[in-house]
Image (spheres, helix red, strand yellow):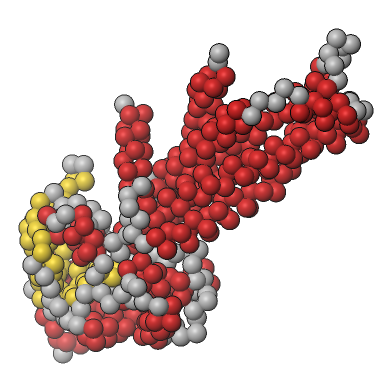
Amino acid sequence: MIEIKNINKTFGDRQVVKDVSFTFHKGKTNLIIGESGCGKTTILKLMVGLHKADSGDILYDGQNFPKLSVNEQENIRKKIGMLFQGGALFDSQTLEENVQFPLDMFTDLTKAEKLEQVNFCLEKVQLVGKNKLYPAELSGGMKKRAALARAIANNPSYLFCDEPNSGLDPKTSIVIDNLIRNITEEFNITTIIVTHDMNSVIEIGDNIMFVHKGENWWTGDKSQILKTKNQELFDFVFASEFMKQVLGSQAK
Amino acid sequence: MNLFFHIGRYFMLLYRVFARPQKHSVYMRQIIFEINNIGISSLPIIAIISVFMGGIITIQAAFGFNSPWVPLYAVGFTTRESIMLEFSPTIVCLILAGKVGSNIASEIGAMRITEQIDALEIMGINSAGYLIFPKIAAAVFIFPFLIALSMFLGIAGGYVMGITSGACTEYEYIFGIQAFFEPWKLYYSFTKVLVFAFIITSVSAYFGYNTSGGALEVGKSSTSAVVYSSILILLFSLILTNLFLNR
């Protein structure tokens, strides 16, 4: 479980995160949603330590991350897997080497054991037999799945996903969403997903925080979000024609 | 003020680069990879430039020594001194600053803007140490060999041009390149090479590591890496020359 309490972040004279608190539950897909530029990716980066919060607490199973020593932070980071928006695969390494990388760095497994783990992860993301391909040879969806395989290679306790569906077609998006949900449930990990994709919200939104102008504007789950009376959230959810039709069919 | 900011940030980066390696076997594998990437791949350009420059220096020396008072072995002597003291350690390192420096800055800069460095950090890896230390170690190890080869090929190029152009005889050239040889000058040359290897890799890595933005900024980082590495090479060449050769 991860809790954030009253976190604030300012860049220059612009406050992008304002007193945000939320609890991300273990074994659930926790979503941070909101319009582009509302501060959701900043919240994610604050949580993993890529940005430093001006104030507030970030508790990983009770351990306050910003207040830990560098070594203690590194120990927590070893339990984090992250899926970046662009995949962030290492260009000079094959898919197999990419997935094996965290194992090389942090485990004393034998070569055969590492390969077994790599193949297990690639099987989980349906990329069996693609071991020797380089990132440049993969499609957008395959890159996301490969990055997901790397993120889970070292059996993380926390999985962060930054817009996992951006740039993907709806069918591939659903594949990625289902993969993330299955991995979350199977390994009982705390998963945090930043997205503005409404399909994902409805598919896998177990626990949702809606961020508006840097603030935690609304919290709930996928069953509650379609019945919201919150005007800003309503405008966000029902922005597309398709969602308006969904709303219309609900009313009937 | 801006200069002090960069100097401070450079040394802070170096502090992270020389932190204890997290996994020696992985670092070792990277160093071997970089020896090939930085060193072996630079062999063709160094060989071509050295042979041609050796030949040119020989012809220019012969042209300049067109006097009965100057013995012809001075052609070989001048070629050796020019190549050993300045051309190979400094000019070849300036060329390597262009080739290797831009490569390092653009590689690390591209990794920065595509979040690959963030990915390393989130995994709990010291990204500065993992990415930069192997490059510095590889360059400091392989550059002396490259420069030694450059010296050999430069003098060999001078030999070929000296004989074929009739600038001097084989005996005079061979005598000239052995005349008044002082081994300590090699210490001077290779000290410069070690310093330049460190400057090229660390300065270029600094610019790449601190890239922010997009492809345009990667290009700017690459240019800055070459410009600042070259200026620092010349500055330290002057300082070291003054220290070693100023009597």
Residue at position x 24%, y 60% in the image: A74
Q: Quadrant of residue B95?
A: top right
Q: Quadrant of residue B169?
A: top right
What x and y, as percent, mark residue A114?
40, 78
What x and y, as percent, mark residue B175?
82, 27
**Number of disc labels:** 0
Residue at position x 40%, y 78% in the image: A110
Residue B80 vs B114, above or below: the answer is above
Residue B244 visible, this orientation: yes
What x and y, as percent, mark residue A67?
12, 55
Q: Nearer the viewer, residue B65 or A97?
A: B65
Residue B229 vs B82, above or below: the answer is below
Residue at position x 42%, y 54% in the image: B131
Q: Quadrant of the C terminus of chain B?
A: top right
Residue B243 vs B199, above or below: the answer is above
Residue B24 vs A55, above or below: the answer is below
Q: Is residue A133 left or right of residue A208?
A: right
Q: Is residue A108 left or right of residue A27?
A: right
What x and y, as percent, mark residue A108?
35, 73
Q: Residue furthest bottom?
A: A252
Q: Quadrant of the N terminus of chain B?
A: top left
Q: Is residue A69 left or right of residue A89?
A: left
Q: Nearer the viewer, residue B243 or B227?
A: B243
